[in-house]
Image: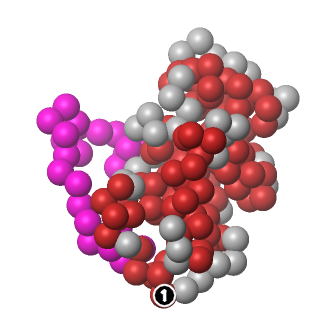
Amino acid sequence: MALILEEYTPTELKLAVTMLRNSGRSGILLDYVASERQHSSRKPKKTEKPASGRNQASLSGTKSRAISKLEEIEPEKFVILREFENLIQAGEVLKTNEAVRNLGERTSKKFVAKKSRKESIAALLGVLAEGSMEDVRNVIEAAIAPDEPADGDQYQRLADFLIKGKG
């Protein structure tokens, strides 16, 4: 368990726990990972701006207006999309503009590809915010566990470990 807590970021663990709980999973192990995630704190990088210099959307943990609108209306979807946005912004998933565009184009005909990665992320999140929870989960699972097994194995191992308690 300690290796998982060291290997994965708090954001990754939070997303995994949220996805597992939303799929009906529960248990002591999930509660433990969730509590450890809350207690662990990463030191801010020197390049990060202080919170006082950020706008209100950033203070709530998201930059996308489409997601911010969900905070009161659909809090569960808001949490999931906010964590997904954080993973994308950190470069942990969908590392290139092309990857964001490909996922957006597979997700919805409403998605309009943009020139910059930042704009494409906002467009993808806007399309996801309009979709159902099931669609959101399916898209995030596809993004986290891509066709390339090398990248997806780590997340699948984490999910399997959290579900089964085995490596």
Kindly identify which residue carries mark 1: 28
In the image: residue 91, left or right of residue 120: left
Residue at image x 46%, y 63%? 14
Vertical comparison of 117 with 41: above or below: above
Image coordinates for residue 56, horizontal then vertical, percent: 37, 45
In the image: residue 33, left or right of residue 125: left
Comparing 58 with 158, the one in front is: 158
Residue 24 among magenta residues: no
Residue at image x 64%, y 46%? 145
Vertical comparison of 137 with 95: above or below: below
In the image: residue 52, left or right of residue 135: left
Quadrant housing residue 106: top right
Q: Amino acid at mark 1?
A: Ile
| Residue furthest out toward the left | 46
| Residue furthest out toward the bottom | 28
Quadrant housing residue 70: bottom right
- Residue 16 showing in the rendered view: no
Residue 44 among magenta residues: yes
The magenta segment is 34-59
Image coordinates for residue 54, horizontal then vertical, percent: 29, 39
